[in-house]
């Protein structure tokens, strides 16, 4: 509800033409309702004007609220206090009703202004937080870029190792960007997979499964896992040939996710003779998410059954 009010509160400035028009509209609608209730036999002269004061004060501030109070009192004294449609001396009860309306409406305006103050301070804090997040994201990207530059300059004579490490750094950086772009700081599993497959043809990829949100920590670690699988598929597996395909299916069992990675159409694959660093990265990343990976080197291509906790 607050999100719906906020744009209007920020758009309508006190003492502006929009505020004046809003006050007139509020009084007009309240008067129409008062006439309609009068046909039904309702005799409360100020009943429909309290909401008008509230709306005007909330959306346009104290000046609009006070203006609606004064305008409403004039309209009621002229149109709804006998004799109707003329100004005449008010009885003691009419004066009491007017004073009660003014005092009550004044309280409404005061509360509405407190709400506006809180809303403005909250919006200001949100803007400051957004600026801080943008600055942190910028510094984070710079940090990843510096790390990549250090790696490449340090391993200038070992291009393959430098490319492998730099790729892992970029995978974490890209996953972190997805996290920062989300208001809930959570990432859809499908979006993370699509990001890692961005360099490949869409015809080579099939993704199927329900919408699953990954926590920030899970997103960063799974970004590394999927990066290693995609890199391996591009070098040695299905994605190394134009006709190769990768199908990824997943299902959720509470917070536990079961994912099947299946490659086909690529060159024949054989089990590795030794455990490389990429395998260690995948295993440790999944272990930290209470998961594991079971790989099978089928004649059609690599098949991996992966489990992990998405929280």
Image: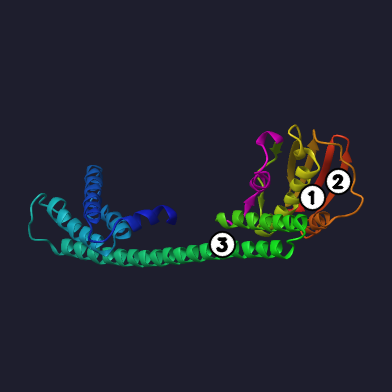
Q: Secondary structure at mark 2?
A: strand
Residue 53, placed above or below residue 208: below
Residue 196 is one of the magenta-drawn residues: yes
Instruction: Name the spot of residue 85 as percent of width and height, x first.
Output: 10, 49
Give the magenta part as a residue range. Answer: 184-204
Please tell me the numbered disc located at residue 137: 3
Q: CA distance from mark 3 to mark 2?
A: 36 Å
User: Looking at the rendering, which quadrant does residue 301 occupy?
Assistant: top right
How crowded pointer 3 is (Cα within 10 Å; few <14, some 14-19, many 20+) is rated as some
- N-term-proximal mark, 1 vs 2: 2
- N-term-proximal mark, 3 vs 2: 3
Q: Taking 44 as reference, is 226 left or right?
A: right
User: Which mark's residue is nearer the viewer, 3 or 1?
Assistant: 3
Residue bearing mark 2 = 295
Residue bearing mark 1 = 307
- N-term-proximal mark, 3 vs 1: 3
Q: CA distance from mark 1 to mark 2?
A: 12 Å
Instruction: Name the spot of residue 270 as percent of width and height, x first.
Output: 89, 42
Instruction: Name the spot of residue 291 as percent of width and height, x first.
Output: 80, 54
Residue located 78% across and 44% down the image: 235
């Amino acid at each position: 509800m607050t999100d719906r009010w906020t744009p209007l509160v920020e758009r309508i400035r006190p003492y502006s033409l929009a505020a004046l028009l809003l006050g007139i509209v509020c009084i007009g609608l309240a008067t129409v309702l008062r006439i309609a209730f009068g046909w039904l036999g309702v005799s409360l002269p100020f009943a429909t004007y309290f909401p008008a004061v509230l709306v005007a004060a909330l959306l346009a501030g104290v000046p609009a609220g006070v203006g609606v109070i004064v305008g409403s009192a004039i309209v009621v004294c002229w149109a709804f206090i006998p004799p109707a449609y003329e100004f005449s001396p008010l009885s003691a009860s009419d004066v009491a009703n007017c004073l009660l309306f003014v005092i009550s409406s004044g309280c409404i305006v005061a509360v509405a202004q407190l709400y506006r103050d809180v809303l403005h301070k909250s919006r200001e804090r949100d803007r400051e937080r957004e600026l801080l997040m943008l600055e942190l994201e910028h510094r984070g990207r710079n940090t990843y870029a510096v790390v990549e530059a250090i790696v490449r300059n340090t391993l200038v004579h070992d291009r393959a190792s430098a490319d492998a490490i730099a790729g892992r750094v970029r995978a974490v950086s890209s996953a972190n960007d997805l996290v920062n772009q989300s208001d809930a700081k959570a990432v859809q599993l499908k979006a993370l997979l699509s990001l890692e497959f961005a360099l490949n043809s869409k015809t080579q990829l099939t993704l199927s499964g329900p919408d699953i949100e990954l926590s920030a920590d899970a997103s960063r670690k799974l970004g590394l896992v999927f990066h290693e699988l995609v890199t391996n598929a591009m070098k040695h597996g299905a994605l190394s040939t134009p006709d190769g395909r990768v199908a990824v299916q997943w299902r959720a069992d509470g917070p536990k996710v079961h994912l099947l990675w299946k490659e086909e159409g690529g060159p024949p694959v054989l089990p590795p003779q030794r455990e490389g660093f990429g395998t260690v990265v995948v295993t440790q990343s999944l272990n930290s998410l209470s998961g594991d990976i079971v790989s099978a080197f089928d004649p059609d291509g690599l098949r991996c059954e992966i489990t992990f906790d998405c929280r």
